[in-house]
Image: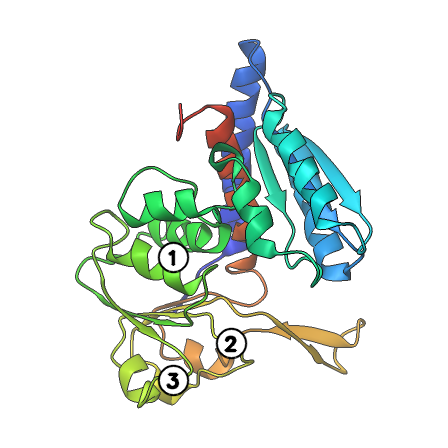
């Protein structure tokens, strides 16, 4: 079994990005700039946005955060998106989700200019990805593809099973794994809450990508010997063995599944660290006008 070290790979990619930013500076070019909109005071969202700002600083990006109280009107939020869309100094924009109930998430996402949608959620970017045109790919699927590529995991002709059909992970992941590129060219099955005979399906997977949102749902009997297992889940559970009083686990029962897997991502330290670094990669593409010219 080989551990897929997302923390190490993300650090390598940050070094690569920092090198490119330094070249841009040396040539007198414009420094990439990522903006984030944060509504309310959700601790997890606050942490993510703060980590984003630190990551930007580490690679030499400019960054800015637009903060609003939870009772901000939808109109004011949309006006801010419009303002950022028109600001030529800002290359990428993310809106931290979920938004409060009185604001339509999709309405806000669709208001972002596709060329600044570095989260890859806008229908234009989703559509471009679907038909194989250059696009911004959402951070988690993008990060998983990087993990597969940098670990030289062969996906051609492999049986890939994806647990979960969300717009953020499952659906885009299925498209990326089936595309006629490398990584890709896999035969893909998408499973969900209505799937019957689930263990029978997962136990035939050469590559198992788990984003089902249930702690330690996947057990050893559901996994094929020698399978590649990618665990997207992250859950906080009580623990008397840590100072914090909790520990993080994934959707996969790691200890027992690791004994059967050829490659496996840990939680934490697997897919998670790739999320922000994927956002940085998309922002660099946006600054260099690689997708939309």
What's the distance in space between the residues labelled 3 and 2, CA to CA? 18 Å
Name the secondary structure under disc 2. Answer: loop
**Crowd tier of the residue under label 3, counting other residues whose Cα lies within 10 Å: few below 14, some 14–19, many 20 or above:** few
Number of residues whose C-alpha sits closer than 10 Å to that of mark 2, classed few (under 14), some (14–19) or many (20 or more)? many
Q: Residues within 10 Å of mark 1 (few under 14, many from 20)?
A: many
Name the residue at 34% across, 43% down: 128
53 up-or-down from 293: above or below = below
Residue furthest to the top in view is 28
**Residue 251, label in figure:** 2
The quarter of the picture where residue 262 lies is bottom left
* Residue at the spot 58% in from the left edge and 15% down from the top edge: 25
Callout in the foreground (2, 1): 1
Work out whether 236 lies above or below 107.
Answer: below
Seen at 42% across and 80% down, the residue is 257
Question: Between disc 3 and disc 1, whose residue precedes?
Answer: 1
Q: Give me the C-alpha separation between circle 3 and circle 1.
A: 19 Å
Q: Are marks 3 and 1 in contact (CB under 8 Å)?
A: no
Residue 245 x %, y %: 79, 77
Q: What residue does disc 1 label?
A: 172
- Residue at the image position 41 percent from the left and 65 percent from the top: 170
- Relative horizontal placement of residue 78, taking residue 253 as reference (left or right): right
Q: Of residues 142 and 166, which is closer to you in this image?
A: 166
Q: Compared with residue 247, is residue 240 higher up or lower down, i.e. above or below? A: below
Mark 3, secondary structure of its residue: loop
Locate residue 189: give its quadrant.
Answer: bottom left
């Amino acid at each position: 079994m080989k551990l897929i070290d997302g923390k190490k790979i993300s650090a390598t990619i940050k070094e690569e990005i920092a090198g490119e930013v330094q070249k841009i500076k040396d040539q007198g070019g414009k420094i990439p700039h990522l903006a984030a909109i944060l509504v309310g005071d959700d601790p997890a969202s606050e942490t993510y946005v703060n980590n984003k700002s630190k990551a930007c600083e580490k690679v030499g990006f400019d960054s800015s955060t637009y903060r609003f109280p939870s009772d901000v009107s939808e109109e004011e939020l949309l006006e801010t998106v419009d303002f950022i869309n028109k600001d030529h100094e800002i290359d990428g924009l993310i809106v931290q989700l979920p938004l409060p109930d009185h604001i339509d998430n999709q309405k806000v996402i669709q208001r972002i200019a596709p060329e600044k949608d570095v989260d890859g959620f806008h229908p234009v970017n989703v559509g471009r990805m679907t038909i194989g045109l250059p696009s911004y790919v959402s951070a988690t699927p993008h990060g998983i593809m990087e993990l597969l590529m940098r670990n030289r995991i062969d996906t051609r002709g492999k049986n890939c099973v994806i647990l979960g059909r969300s717009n953020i992970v499952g659906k885009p992941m299925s498209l990326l794994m089936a595309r006629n590129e490398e990584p890709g060219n896999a035969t893909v099955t998408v499973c969900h809450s209505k799937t019957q005979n689930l263990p029978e399906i997962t136990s035939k997977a050469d590559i198992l990508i788990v984003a089902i949102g249930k702690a330690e749902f996947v057990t050893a009997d559901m996994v094929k010997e020698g399978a590649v297992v990618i665990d997207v889940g992250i859950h906080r559970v009580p623990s008397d063995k840590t100072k914090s009083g909790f520990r993080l686990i994934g959707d996969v029962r790691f200890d027992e599944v690791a004994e059967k897997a050829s490659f496996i991502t840990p939680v934490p330290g697997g897919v998670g660290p790739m999320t922000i670094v994927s956002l940085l990669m998309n922002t660099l593409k946006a600054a260099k006008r690689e997708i939309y010219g």
